[in-house]
Image (cartoon, rainbow, N blue to C red):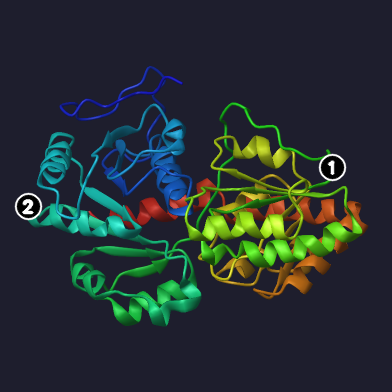
Amino acid sequence: MKRHKLDINNQQPTTNNQQPKTNSTLRVLQLIDSLHTGGAERVAVNIANALASQITASYLCATREEGLLKESIAKDVGYLFLSKKKAIDLKAISTLSNYIKSNKIEIIHAHSTSFFLAVLLKLVNKRLKIVWHDHYGGSAFLEKRPFKILKICSGYFSQIFSVNTALEAWAKTNLKCKEVMYLSNFAIENANQAVTSLKGGDGKRIIHLANLRPQKDHFTLLEAFKKVNSLYPEWSLHCVGKDFEDAYSKAIHNRIKGLKLEKQAFIYGSLPDISNILKQSTIAVLASKSEGLPIALLEYGLAGLPVVVSDVGDCKRVIESPHLGQLIPAENASRLSQAIIKYICDLESAKKKGLHLKGHVKAHFSERVIMNTLIAQYQQIV
């Protein structure tokens, strides 16, 4: 896929199909550690893409690693990869500092742990404004969160955006920046070419979009699916998300073998064509122990899928009533299996819930709604 690449000496991305700008003064860079398919990474790319048609210039910088999401960056977004090797990498700092000056960037919108680099850049460029976006996935365990360096750096932030209300309250209590607000995640339909064909039978697939991390609780998911599969052996489970090939990953694969689910439960790793994958799915689940506001849940909604999701983080802001989906307690395989079976037994009712959720997500978690709020905050900062 051909995509515009911004030269460091250019002041603005250009394209032959430049859309009219709703704001003609802002120049904003999204800063993210990698372009792997995690929630924070998707938000950074989605924001950069959405801003490209609404402000003077939108940029994105991946500091440490690239990944599948690189192909999702819009052609009119200026892109820079730093290949940063350590916390204080003088070459990377110099490269990004020159890029910011050459392109007259006013705001760095730093996501997750990239705040440290943003603060180093502000120390050599006083006019820069820093917005920090807190995507912390362990919001159910905030008492264990290390934040000494973050607290020091927060004194340089002009604004903090928190992806759920628990993180918003935590930042107001623990950090130095006084401008803190909840900013909902939003999802967009993935336009990448369809390349994935899911295994299993059509109309009988359960999808789980989540990287292989402990907070996503694949073990409760597998235990629940074993109960479902014993009653409905024609149904299959499909886990899509980055496999870090670590001890947690190994334990998941071993658990699948131990439960004798090798022919019904499938691990795919990271995949680029999420919308295509969701079109092949019938029921969507999230079994997490902790969440902010998961992008996967919003993507399920846009796809019109009936969902079962743990009542963690701000998931209840999306599934705010029973006609939108099923909220269940975390770490409860019995309740999870019961909820899935309820859908299987009445697929027509399940499909109606999926359609209701689709309308709700479009009305309250759309790109347009969130971008209007974001741009208004940017304007106040500059």
Q: Are marks 2 and 1 in contact (CB under 8 Å)?
A: no
Q: Nearer the viewer, residue 88 or 269?
A: 269
Q: Quote the CA–CA distance across marks 2 and 1.
A: 57 Å
Q: Is residue 340 visible?
A: yes
Q: Secondary structure at mark 2?
A: helix
**At x 89% / y 55%, what residue is drawn?**
232
| Residue 198 location, quadrant | top right
Residue 203 numbered mark, or none: 1
> What's under tag 1, amino acid-wise?
Gly
* Labels 2, 1: front one: 1
User: Residue 259 location, x and y as percent?
Assistant: 75, 60
Residue 162 is left or right of residue 62, and the answer is right
Instruction: Determine the residue located farthest toward the left in the rendered image.
Output: 124
**At x 71% / y 72%, what residue is drawn?**
328
Q: Is 308 situated above or below 71?
A: below
**At x 42% / y 31%, what residue is drawn?**
74
Instruction: Determine the residue located farthest toward the top in the rendered image.
Output: 16
Residue 124 numbered mark, or none: 2
Q: Is residue 285 visible?
A: no
Residue 239 is left or right of residue 162, and the answer is right
Q: Is 193 situated above or below 174?
A: above
**At x 49% / y 60%, what residue is drawn?**
247
Q: Nearer the viewer, residue 46 or 67?
A: 67
| Residue 29 location, quadrant | top left
Q: Nearer the viewer, residue 292 or 227?
A: 227
Residue 90 is left or right of residue 366, and the answer is left
Q: Residues within 10 Å of mark 1 (few under 14, many from 20)?
A: few
Q: Secondary structure at mark 1?
A: loop
Residue 135 numbered mark, or none: none
Residue 200 is left or right of residue 315, and the answer is right
User: Residue 50 location, x and y as percent?
Assistant: 44, 40
